[in-house]
Image: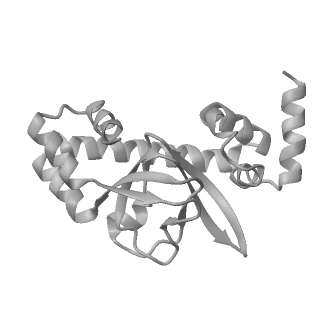
Amino acid sequence: MIDSLLSNIQNLITLSPAEIDIVKSLFKEKSYKKGDFFLEEGRVCKYVGFVAKGLMRYYINHDGEEKIYDFSQENEFVCNYESFLQQIPSLKNIQALENSIVFVISHADLQLFYASVRGGERFGRIAIEAVFIKLLQDISSLYSETPELRYERFLKKHADLQQRISQYHIASFVGVKPQSLSRIRKRIFSQM
């Protein structure tokens, strides 16, 4: 399963056989059962994870209601970078929606990765740039798109997740109640 992590890294930088061994020694395989937390609000994010199998949701608690703002699935990284990079308590939660296998690296080991792997810092920079761009797009979407457009974007970006995520979670991500999502879905699918 670590091969998917190695492939992801090697899409951006070349790893020598010795560097592959370094990556294998720094990333640890961790299992999460459905409902387990990768990160709970109030705790410091200790790891960057790579989802080899499974699905995670990111959410905040707002006025007693869960507001989902992202998902990480196979071949994607999972982390609250705000908490991880600064090593401060998180205001967000990351929870497994399915039984998941995640390869995790600690803050200290990530520094070793940067120092020991030629191109490691380049990989980190490119990965963080992608996170930053996605964050800007998500903020823009939140303020400029209707719930219907947000749902259409969800379908384009996460078409394969529709069968794996409850309608309640999709509605939360889109920013509507489940009943409103049903109406949006009817409108969209009646136009097809």
Image quadrant in which you'd find residue 125: top left
Question: Image check: 10 left or right of 66?
Answer: left
Q: Residue at x 66, y 44 (%)?
A: 164
Question: Image check: 192 left or right of 87?
Answer: right
Vertical order, 155 against 113 (above or below): above
Q: Position of residue 107 (x, y in %)?
A: 27, 63
Q: Residue at x 26, y 41 (%)?
A: 123
Question: Image check: 16 left or right of 61?
Answer: left
In the displayed orientation, state which residue is furthest to the top.
Answer: 192
Q: Nearer the viewer, residue 22 or 149?
A: 22
Vertical order, 49 against 149 (above or below): below
Vertical order, 73 against 107 (above or below): above
In the displayed orientation, state which residue is furthest to the bottom.
Answer: 42
Question: Image check: 50 left or right of 15?
Answer: right
Q: Quadrant of the C terminus?
A: top right
Q: Residue at x 84, y 31 (%)?
A: 188
Q: Nearer the viewer, residue 75 or 41?
A: 75
Image quadrant in which you'd find residue 183: top right
Q: Quadrant of the N terminus?
A: top left
Vertical order, 167 against 119 (above or below): below
Question: Tag count in the figure?
Answer: 0
Q: How is the image coloured?
A: one colour
Q: Position of residue 54 (x, y in %)?
A: 52, 47
Q: Position of residue 19 (x, y in %)?
A: 13, 41
Q: Position of residue 191 (x, y in %)?
A: 87, 24
